[in-house]
Image (cartoon, rainbow, N blue to C red):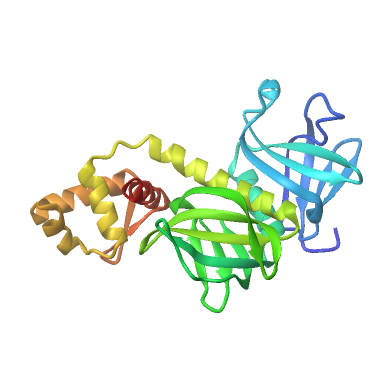
Amino acid sequence: MADSVVADFVTDVIPDTGSYAEPVRSRVLMNRQQVVLVTPDDRISVPIGDVFDIAYGSAPKELRAFFEDTVSVAYEDGQSKRVALIEGADDTVERFTDLLFKGILNKTTVAIKHPAKVGGRITDETFEKGALYVSPAAVKFKTEDPFSIEVSTVSGFERITRDVFGSSRPVLSVRHADSSGIVTSEIALQPERKMNVLGRFLRIEYSQLKTELEDISLRDMDVEALVGLYSGATKGSLAGMLGVDASQVSTLLQKLVEKGLLTEAQSRWQLTSTGKLAVGEHLEEVNL
């Protein structure tokens, strides 16, 4: 690989589900242009521009005898579509997945309407051009007025059709929370495979956070405290907001830290991604 390598590791791989019946020990390399799978008998190069889907999570049922968790990379090979499966049961492969999403999506030119809706109200915003960037926690848009969508606040998305700069185009409509409540942003990007990958990115990150949140027991007061902090309340103002004394607030916040919903740094309380998801789900219920 002539370009700088950003990922290089050895794991079990099914380089092509149509040709291999079981995994082989392989070396996986990635740079900005391609993913290379080096098996004992072959070397398969997958250009980043040919990847049209990425899935991270449980292995397909028929392959669970070989894998627990996998990354599946679907790509075009001439007129054919192929899928490679990479064992994904460690942090190295998770980082590889993040890098692959970034390699496909970062710096993509998009048309973005934000917000297209506030609650159920349609705004008079129009589409503007910008550049898209992803991180594990957010989708960021560089426009005249930059903003980001935190994955933990996404409550739903769908593909729709909109008039964008004079032509009818597919658009990803994303419902998410911001400081004003539930809003909808509409994103158009080309080619279509990139829209597929962006939708998959949102689905994977949201699903992981959703699983974490489902394992946490929350009382109404816990959620009210999280919503208050998300809206700018301080520890001091929470007591009056919740109708409890200061010592109870301290105990409540400490329990939220232990549950992984809050962090404290320099006497400031910040919601974790899972905490923001709890707020987003609450705001979605209120909005309904």
170 or 44, which is in the foreground? Answer: 170
Would residue 2 appear left or right of 179 to someone viewing this image?
right
| Residue beneath the point at 17% across and 53% down | 250
38 or 177, which is in the foreground? Answer: 177
User: Residue 210's quadrant in the figure?
Assistant: top left
Where does the image place residue 150, in percent across and percent down from the top left?
A: 48, 58
User: Residue 240's quadrant in the figure?
Assistant: bottom left
Residue 253 can be seen in this image: yes
| Residue beneath the point at 31% across and 49% down | 286
Residue 136 can be seen in this image: no
Where does the image place residue 66, in percent across and percent down from the top left?
A: 70, 24
108 or 285, which is in the foreground? Answer: 285
Would residue 235 appear left or right of 121 to someone viewing this image?
left
The extreme left residue here reads: 245
Q: How many dots with numbers?
A: 0
Task: Give the quarter of the figure containing the N terminus.
Answer: bottom right
Where does the image place residue 117, in percent across and percent down from the top left?
A: 46, 61
Would residue 48 appear left or right of 57 to someone viewing this image?
right
Where does the image place residue 156, in percent across and percent down from the top left?
A: 50, 47
97 or 228, which is in the foreground? Answer: 228
| Residue beneath the point at 65% across and 63% down | 163
